[in-house]
Image (cartoon, grey):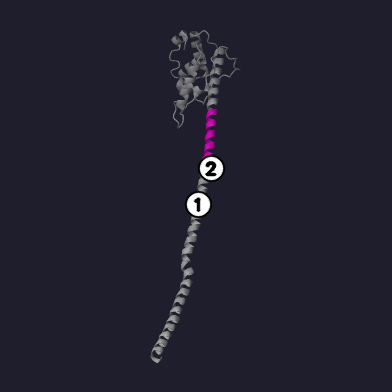
Amino acid sequence: MADNNKNEQTGGLFSGLKKLLFKDEFSTPVTTTPTPTPPPLPAAVPPPLPAAAFSTESNLPATGVSDEQMRAKAYQLLESINQPGCDFLEVWNAAEENGGANAMNIKSAFNALKHADKTLTKDKVMSTGVYYANELQKALDAEVAKKTAERQQLEVQKRQQRQTLSDSVAAIEKQMADLQQSLTDKKKQLTELDAGYDPRFADLELKINTGKTTITTMIQQMRQMLSIVEKEL
């Protein structure tokens, strides 16, 4: 990017990288040759990119992240840590644009690009490829850990809310049961109301009738006596 030779010889090499990254979910490109033991990373490599640069929260919808959006994020990350000169990314991109990262295209891309950048070597391609893959893996691991923690927190909130709602439902059900029992008792009392009062009404009615009969008889007798007294005395 910063190197003039690279700008002249590899213009547009990154034009298709965004659509090519992450075809196999964060796997490194597959070649037909055995993978050698990666050499040590160059001493002057950029510091690891903060995991926040890979976060999808600011630009992606809350409903989910599409494969295209995730590839775009990965591309942005790789661009931000791309080292000067031609390296793994330029070789990979050139091979993909020529039909895919197979052995023939990788060799062709490598041979063409090393003429534009004399620092391009097999060791450089290997070390920078390991570096880029490791940085993507770190960013992925950090994001997965963050989202896992968020999920665990949501699970705790869900359990707490479930318990609160369950307690509320149980309390309401108990109130309803108590009310139902109270309603049943009141209906029973209403049904038995006449049976409880009828004997008392009958007793009072008997007393009234008995009293009326007795007193009426006594009054008649007193009046008869008054009549005799008036006539005979």
Q: Is residue 184 visible?
A: yes
Of marks 2 and 1, the one in the foreground: 1
Q: Magenta segment, principal secondary structure?
A: helix
Mark before the other along the chain sequence, 2 or 1: 2
Spot the residue most to the right: 37
Q: Compute the Cα span from label 2 to label 1.
A: 18 Å
Q: Position of residue 231 (x, y in %)?
A: 38, 91
Mark 1: amino acid:
Gln
User: Which residues fall within the magenta stretch?
Assistant: 145-161
Q: Which residue is mark 1?
A: 175
Q: Is residue 201 above or below residue 70?
A: below
Q: Is residue 2 above or below residue 147?
A: above
Residue in the foreground of this view, choosing between 227 and 8: 227
* Numbered badge on residue 68: none
Q: Is residue 156 magenta?
A: yes
Residue 95 appears in the figure:
no
* Screen quadrant of the C terminus: bottom left
Q: Nearer the viewer, residue 26 or 210?
A: 210
Pick the residue in front: 18 or 177: 177
Magenta stretch: includes residue 88: no
Residue 149 image point, x, y percent: 54, 31
- Compared to 194, does 89 lie above or below? above
To which residue does mark 2 refer? Answer: 163
> At label 2, which amino acid type do we have?
Gln
